[in-house]
Image (tube, grey):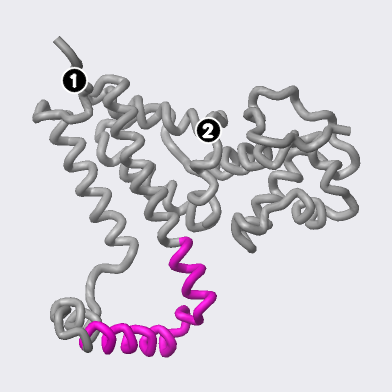
Amino acid sequence: MRKPISGPAPLIWTQPPPPPRQRSLGRAEIVAAAVGLADEAGAGALTMKAVAARLGPYSAMALYRYVHSKDGLVDLMLDAATAEIPRPVQPGPDWRADLEELAAQTRQMTRRHPWYAALYHTRPPAGPHLMERLEFMLAVLTAQGASTAEAMTYAAMIDRYILGSALQDAEEARMSREHGLDDEATLRSAMNAVHDLAAATGRLPRLTGWLAHPAGPPPEEQFRLGLGFLLDGIARCLTGAENPARSEKIGP
C-alpha cells in the first residue's frame, strides 16, 4: 500500500497512472468526493480522512493508491474544476470579448467552488485543463501582436484579478455566515455600529456619509468594471503605447 508523502509532493501528472478501480472506488470518485466536501465545508475541511469517510467504507490510506498524496488530490481537484470552464477552441474576432467571457465563466466556476481561489496558488498550474485554459489566453493575446512573454504577463494579471476577487468573495461570504451578516437586519445593525464609530472620530466625513446611505454597483457589476479597466490598460499596450510588460535590457 502506498504511504503518504511527507513534504512537498511531486505533481500528480508526473506520477504513474492509478490502478484499476476496485468496487466503487477510483480516482474519479475520490476527486468528486473531495470537491463535494470542499464545496460544502471549505478548503480547511479537506483531509484524506474526511474524503474517505464521505466515500464510505474506506480508510484514508486506501485513497493514496489513486491520488498519491493530499497535494496530488488538490492537483486533480483544481484541474477538474477548471475543466468546467467553457472556452472556444480558437480565439474569435474580438479579443476583449474572448477574455471577458473567459473571465465571466471562470468567476462562475469559482462561485460554485469557493475553495478554488484559496487552493489555486498552493500547487503549480500543471494540470491539462489548467494549461489548455492558459494556452487559449496566450493565443488570444499573441494574435493581437503581444509577444509570448508579454501575453504571459497580461494573462497573469487577469487571473490575479479574477482569483483575487473570488478569494475576497469567498472570505466575505464566510464572514457573513459566521457573524450572521447574511441577515439584512443584522447587517444593517452592524453597519450602523461602524457608522457611529466613524462619526465619533470627526475626521471621516466621506466614509460617515456613505455608511449612512450606502450606494454603488452590485458585486458583479464591480467585477466587470474592474476587468474593463484592466483590459483597457492591456489594449493600450497592444496598440503600441508605452509597454511596461516588455523587459528592458539591463547593463551597457
Residue 72 position in % (x across, y down): 67, 36
Q: Residue furthest left?
A: 241
Residue 192 appears in the figure: yes
Which quadrant of the rendered structure holds the N terminus? Answer: top right
Q: Magenta stretch: residue 248 in it?
A: no
Tell me which residue sits at (22%, 22%) in the image: 247
Tell me which residue sits at (31%, 88%) in the image: 192
Q: Which mark is residue 218?
A: none
Q: Which residue lies under the disc numbered 1?
A: 248
Relative to 3, 46 lies left or right? left
Which quadrant of the rendered structure holds the C terminus? Answer: top left
Relative to 233, 88 lies left or right? right
Count of all numbered marks drawn on residues in the image: 2
Question: What type of secondary structure mainly makes up the magenta span?
Answer: helix
Tell me which residue sits at (83%, 29%) in the image: 19
Eyeballing the image, is 66 above or below 167?
above
Identify the amino acid type marked 2. Pro
Q: Quadrant of residue 108?
A: bottom left
Q: Magenta stretch: residue 189 in it?
A: yes
